[in-house]
Amino acid sequence: MLVAIASSRSPLGHSYQVPIIADADTGFGSPINVVRTVSVYINSNVAAFHIEDQVLAKRCGHLENKALVSVDEWVTRIRAASLTRIQMGRDIVIIARTDALQSFGYDEALRRSRAAVDAGADVAFLEGFRTREEARQFCKDMFPTPVLLNMVPGGVSPLLTVNEAKELGAKIMIYPLLALTPVYNAVTAAARVLKKPGETESLPDGTSGGIRDIFGVCAMQECVQVDEKVGCQDYKAGI
């Protein structure tokens, strides 16, 4: 799982000057596994990652009945991540995500977040906040530590605009379904049309064509340029 996630991020991290925030899940095991996870993400040029206090067999933060590790075990994960960063001499950002709010309440979530920061985390992440005022209070209570807010459509947290989040005091927002949801909807619609009536011509403009655009996204032109620079003739006649 870790290798698959790291492999999916490595091309972005190496090819573009875009900071990537990765999901480190629970660290994928013991502190030793956390060390492995962080080192892989660092070598993949990930800019930041969030790591959480759920048990290894975790579930989405917007589902119910989540099981958490003790605060002591949670802190060892953060320490392991911080130690790895120091030993590798890199500045990857550690985001401490707590899922304690649902099962243990706000005070315990705040206690865990503060403990994580004391152990080396740079950013606090309260998963599943339920109201704007709860988010505002968390930002206030964690100050000066930056706070990340997670926007999940259909989840337990209210959806905020960027300006609203700034007003509440948040410094980072993530939208994990921003790209996935439109893709899911478009692919589902296209598959239904293909199934019945059994053609693709009636699909909206751009849905049934655009292969040249796809080539562009996949860096075809960059491949052609490399070929020309090294003196090959593979694309001399055009593409």
Image: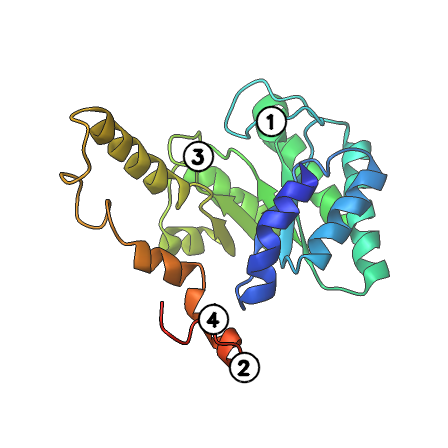
Q: Residue 234 — which label? A: 4
Separation (CA) of disc 4 from disc 3: 53 Å
User: Is 52 placed above or below 37 here?
Assistant: above
* Mark earlier in primary sequence (3, 2): 3
Amino acid marked by disc 1: Gly
Q: Which of the two labelled residues, at mark 4 and mark 3, occupies the earlier sequence position?
A: 3
Q: CA distance from mark 1 to mark 4?
A: 63 Å
Q: Quadrant of residue 151?
A: top left
Left or right side of 237 for 171: right
Report the label total: 4
120 with respect to 215 (left or right):
right
N-terminal of the pair, mark 1 or mark 4, is 1
Under mark 4, the amino acid is Asp
Mark 3 vs mark 2, CA separation in Å: 56 Å
> Which mark's residue is nearer the viewer, 1 or 4?
4
Disc marking residue 157 = 3
Taking the spot 61% from the left edge, 64% from the top edge, the residue there is: 14
Say above or below: 43 vs 34.
below
Relative side of 137 to 75, left or right: left
